[in-house]
Each structure stands twice: as structure tokens, then as C-alpha cells.
Image: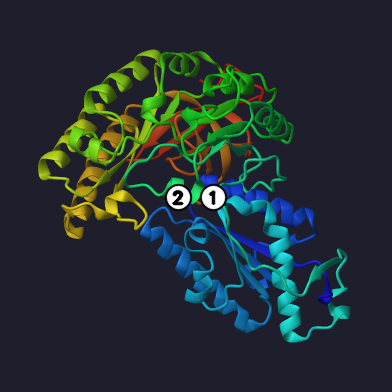
Amino acid sequence: MAPVYWLPTIKLHLTTLGCPKNQVDSEAMLGLLAKDGFRPTGAIEDAELVVVNTCAFLGSAVEESRRTIRSIARLKSRGTLKGLVVAGCWAQRDGAAIAQQIKGVDAVLGTGSVEKVVGLARAVLARAAARTGESTRAHAAGTARRRVPAQGPLDEVHAPGGALTSLPRALSTPRHVAYLKISEGCDHRCTFCIIPHLRGDQQSRPLASLVAEARLLAASGVKELILIGQDTTAYGVDLPGPDRPRLVTLLKALGDVDGLVWIRVMYTYPREWDEELMDVLGSHPKLVKYVDMPLQHIHDVMLKKMARASNRARTERLLAEIRRRIPGVRLRTSFIVGFPGETKEHYESLRSFVSDMEFDKVVVFAYEPEREAPSSGFTGRVPERVKESRRARLLELQQGISARKLARRVGAIETVLIDGPADDGRMSARTEGEAFEVDGAVFVEGPGLAPGQFARVRVTGASAYDLWATALSTEPVALVGGTR
């Protein structure tokens, strides 16, 4: 029988890179580890175990993950850090090869193995004790004791996935805001994207489980619930039974949860929209009038090469219908420039479209080839300097559009949700038209403002992306129907 060691309570630090979907996985891992007795710390230099939840959506994201991990690994020379676990999308993509690339990595944990983080962490620390010859008495000093094999698997990369079950979550957001991951993976096969490789096919979480978690979050003080997934509009397509719930069903059920005031949907896919979804978003008092819908391009040639299953005419009709059925809606989208084969004509068509549509928020990516994506083998590569120039010009165009739209709001009275203190003594807040962490802010001045409060404000100033306002009054949190 392999020897065993007693492990004391361990100081843990978890670093999250990438998107909110990764953040939910980190919250699940942190919840599992904390439940098992690990003690989270925000001071990475004091941590004995560090978990880095990585992103690998783009090559630049992998580079950020690599730099972060190397920086953390250097802390081992100080003697406090005993274990370094690499989790998330890069771990899923490259597995144990990461440990060969970066000295000091002790284990890798794939996206579909979140629930195994505790066992893996134990194995890492037990091996560290065995290497140093640390006595069992030293490990028994903590208040939470556990028996861990001296040897164990340091590679937990299996089928792709993510945290979809009711795992205990340690929220990393302010207590009034929380993400709710309603699905994992994606059934679309966009030629630039490796998400199915990293996260698998569409997996929807059962409706009852989502509503139950939403109730728990609301009871803990959450006022804004943000629904996320790779394709939230495809929610339910994979669930069993002829009466399987769809996104509209879920939204109506979440709308009945007491305590929630704002419900926001992110990551919608153009092909899955229908009139029923538009009407629910336009009429339900708790559903914010905000649409996040990555379009990626608008020229038909590019859309076909990207395998987006849409075209310009269909997209323009969809946007017009959304604006008609959801009055006052704020639209957020993203585009890719420099995709293989993109000509000047294709790009100018995209610029014209952005100018005509006047989106509220636009994100622009310069195309990056990924080895697992079909587009990595496409011909017609666009030079880097051209890609960056096209990205800069499109962002400049959108900056002017955003500045004009925000300037028109000066003098208006709006309802905001206070997120927390800003650097200049004001409070950072958002209207329903700004999503948490990814959009601009409303900087509010006034007495008695606190995170989680709703307030009526008068907009006094605007920049290209942010607003400034003066508080007129604060309102009860139970504002159902009164936040607009």
C-alpha cells in the first residue's frame, strides 16, 4: 500500500483568465476546495496552492496564460508555493504537455473535470510532501485533516465540458451580481472557432436545476442574474422529451424568482432568434432590454467562409425586427477582421454596415489562426499590419458612433444599479443597457449610495464609452417593473 500523509489547511489562490464562463468554472472549483477545507487568499505570494484557470480561445489568450503561469511558477523558489495546477481551456487543449513547456507545473485539469479539482489538489500536495520529506506531524498542524495518497494522477484531462451541475460556488462577483451558466459547449461549427474542441457539443442544464440555483442566489442578495453559455439561444435543444424547455421557457421561469430585479442574456446566436423570444424580452419587466449577439462579419462571402449559416439580408431583417419588438433595446456585437480571403471590398462592406446600424457596443478582433480550426488551412492570409489597421479603423468608427449616442443621453433621468466605488470618489454604476464588466459605466455622485442599490440619476456628462450622473434618489431593491 502506498504511504499516506496528513495535510493541514492549505492557503489557496485561484487565478481566472478569459471569459465569464471560465469564471463560473473557477467559482465552482473554489467552492469545492473551500468546502474541503482549503483557505482562499487574495495574496498569491502567501498561497501554498495556486490554480490557474486558463483561456485558449485565441493564440494571444494562450500567450497570456503562458506568461501568467511562468510568473506564478517562479514563486516556488521562495518556498511557500507547494503546488501549481493549470486548469481550463489551455489544459484541455494541450494537457500534460504544458508541464513540459513550463517548469513548476504540477498538474493539469481539463474543462470536463472540474469536480475532480479537490482530489487532484490533494495529490499534488502529497507529492510535494513526499519530495521534501516533510513529516506527517507538520501536515497535521491544520484544523482540517485529510488522508491523501503520496502518489496519484497529476493529469485529469478527459472529455471536454464545464461546470454545469449544482456544485458549490464561491462567487467572485459583487454580491448583487451573479452569472448563471445555462449551457456548455456548442453545436455550431464556425470555421474560426475551437470552442467545440475545448468545451464539447451543446449541453443544456435542466431547467429545474437552474431555477433552484437562481432562487439560492436571489436569497443571498443577488439582484442581477446574467445568463451565459456558448450559445444561450440554443438552450434546451439537447434536453430529452418532446416538451423540452427552450430559452423563452427558462426566462419566464426565472422571471418568477423573488428578489431578482434584472435578468440579462449574453452570447446569443443570430440563427436561433424568433419572435417569441423578442416579445418576451420586450415585455417582461425583469428582462433587460439588451441584446448581445456576435455577428462576426456581414459580407455574404465572409459569412459563408466562416460557416455562420446566415447572410446580410437575413441579419438586417433580424436586427430591424429586434429593434421594432424591443423598443429602446441596446445592441452589443462583435466582428472579426482580417479573416482569410477578406478583401478591401469585404471590409468596406462591414464598415458601411457598422455605420448604418449604429450599434451601442462593438468589439473587434483581428483574426488569429488556431491549429484546430478549419480556417487555419484557408488560403488568402491577410497581412498582420492590414488586419491591425482594419481593426483600428473599425473601432475608431464605432467610437464616434458611441460618443454621439451617449451624448444624446445627457440630461436624461435613468435608473442605475450601483456596482461599487470608482477611483474618483464617485460610485460606478450601470443602466440596464450596460453589461457587468464588459461595457462602459455610469459614474454617479451623491450621498448614501451603496453597492447593490438602485438609484434614479440625472445624466450630466458623456465620453465615448462612459456616462457621468448625479443621484436624485435611491429606490427599494424590489423595483420589479420600475427600473426603466
Specify few, some or many for label 2: CA neighbours under 10 Å numbering under 14, 14-19, or 20 or more: some
Number of the label disc, if any, that sits on residue 316: none
Question: Which residue appears at 42% of the width and 40% of the height?
Answer: 440
| Label 2 residue SS | helix
Decide: is 118 above or below 395: below
Q: Position of residue 433 (x, y in %)?
A: 44, 30
Question: Which residue appears at 67% of the width and 31% of the height?
Answer: 214
Question: Which residue appears at 42% of the width and 53% of the height?
Answer: 57
Return the residue found at the far front. 1
Residue in front for this viewpoint, 151 or 442: 151
Q: Position of residue 126 (x, y in %)?
A: 75, 74
For this view, does 260 lie left or right of residue 303? right
Question: How far is the residue under mark 2 from the one under mark 1?
Answer: 7 Å
From the image, tell me which residue sits under label 1: 160
Residue in front for this viewpoint, 362 or 137: 137
Residue in front for this viewpoint, 10 or 197: 197
| Label 1 residue SS | loop
From the image, tell me which residue sits under label 2: 197
